Image: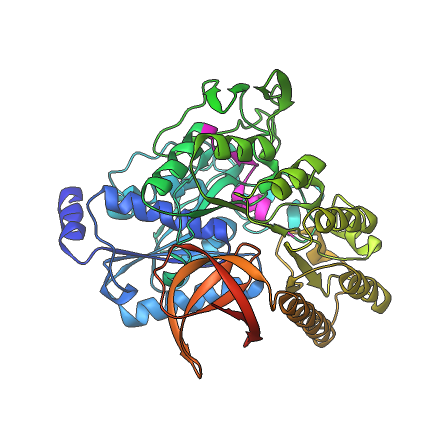
Amino acid sequence: MGYLRLRYYGEVSGYYVENFGCRATQADGAALERQFEERGLVRAASPTQASVVVLNTCTVTTSADQDARAAIRRVRRQNPEARIVVTGCYAQRAPDEIAALPGVDLVIGNSHKHLLAEIALDKDKVHVPTPAFVPLHALAPKSQRPFLACPELSEGTSNQRLADDHRPIFVSDIFAHTELFAAPVFDAANERTRPNLKVQDGCDNRCSFCVIPYVRGQSRSLAPDRIMREVNTLVDAGYREVVISGINLGRWGRDLAPAWVHLGEVATAHVGIAAMADVGTAAPGCPGERSSPAPATLHKSGENRTRSLESLIRTILAQTSLEKLRISSVEPMDWTDDLIALVASSPRIAKHAHVPMQSGSDAVLRRMHRKYRPWHYREKIEKIHTAMPTAAIGADVMVGFPGETDSEFEATRQMIDDLPFTYLHVFTYSPRPGTPAAEMADQVPVHVARERNRILRETAAAKKLAFMRTFVGRSVEAITLNVIGNDADGEFTEALTDNYLKLHLRGRHDPNSWMRASIQDVMDGALVGQ
């Protein structure tokens, strides 16, 4: 039966992976595609043409869960013969909820994502290691456990189990897993010139509103030699810019074994690396707790240093010929003076800093369990702006957090107004099951939170427009994308500047080229130049 099933899936149209959510999820999706391709399957053009449809879900908000459920219904309606496999963060958080949905054949959590293609193609034959199943509610402090999802699951259960109607669920303690998918991802057809490489996953912070640590596990890093191989492969394929990302990118390297770097030559201590890297170590005690590894050190020009994001960036610059490296979101306290100086001084690093803020209110930040105060955050942004006056500086901001008063919101609005942000990602708080914030009193009415969201979005739009107008009459560097458009003045090529601004470059230009452009105007949210 296993052979027949495998032959069946090899003969039909193949697989399709649909991703939801953040860059990390997109990167996981790219690694899933590699799994299927290594087994001889071909990617279908759409879910309607695939025999296996993988929905790689997000669970950061209620609407993310709703999007996943809507996708399940859509695929079932459009392609009733497909095997629907649901994976990702929603699958890790609420496997029984998903397994109960009509049309779902398999639920595979992040804990088993590294085996997904093997399970999906022949779940009866695949060998799945069987550490004890640890329910989600056991991954939090005892005081929080009653509120987390799946309390009905008991410890000691196999990590494969059956839903009520015998559909299998593959979910186990994410904190016991050390796998890290590492496959470059291309966000969309128009950005095939800017691959994204995830070099870190998981998070050791415990923000009161966030479920991500419980569905992605402890912070773990991709080993430097694996990163160098991936980046060099992309460079050899002709890519001119690479974005490095992670769930908590600034923590890269803290979990790795000791290593030495000698003037750009990487010689790492043994870190297991296969098709995916085994990274980090789980603590032998309670789930979710981690051991404290011996401090990892680097030696460069006679100087001992803690392994850090800065050391990784320097190694990429030394070990590859990559023309432009872009750094994705980094938490405020990880923007060290060394990192700021490095980004500011190297022409090979994009002048772009995304620094999550969440709130400008000290009281709200404390309730969020964030590790910085407003004055810390302000200092970091001012240092970045002083070092790089033309850099893009962006932030994530949350409105409507439980108990947020008018004065607390005003503190956030005022800080945004004061600081040199060039764009914002504004989110309305969404309660996540099992998080402390979901149980807090004084939940903000939806209409109040939405109005606060509108106010900040308007402020952000005004600041972005003002920033863009400062470049009129100046020259900028930009990489051309794979999009050709037309407007009243004729044909243009879409491009992205070094400092993260959309550019309409007059005429038709080949994609994946760094060019200098003279900016003439700002129209429809983009610079216009030639």
Residue 221 shown in magenta = yes
Where does residue 370 sit, x and y in percent of width and height?
74, 47
* Side of 406 relative to 368 (left or right): right
Furthest toward the bottom, the residue is 488
Rendered residue at 37%/31% (across/down): 129
Furthest toward the right, the residue is 407
Rendered residue at 24%/59% (across/down): 44
Q: Which residues are magenta?
A: 210-224
* Side of 45 relative to 231 (left or right): left
> Colour scheme in the image?
rainbow
Front position in the image: 519 or 27:
519
| Viewport quadrant of the N terminus | top left
Front position in the image: 334 or 351:
351
Where does residue 25 sit, x and y in percent of width and height?
46, 51
Where does residue 355 sit, x and y in percent of width and height?
66, 51
User: Can residue 88 be seen in this snapshot?
Assistant: no
Furthest toward the top, the residue is 302
The image shows residue 62, relative to residue 23, as above or below, that is below
Where does residue 314 sit, x and y in percent of width and height?
55, 32
Front position in the image: 320 or 507:
507
User: Can residue 419 be seen in this snapshot?
Assistant: yes
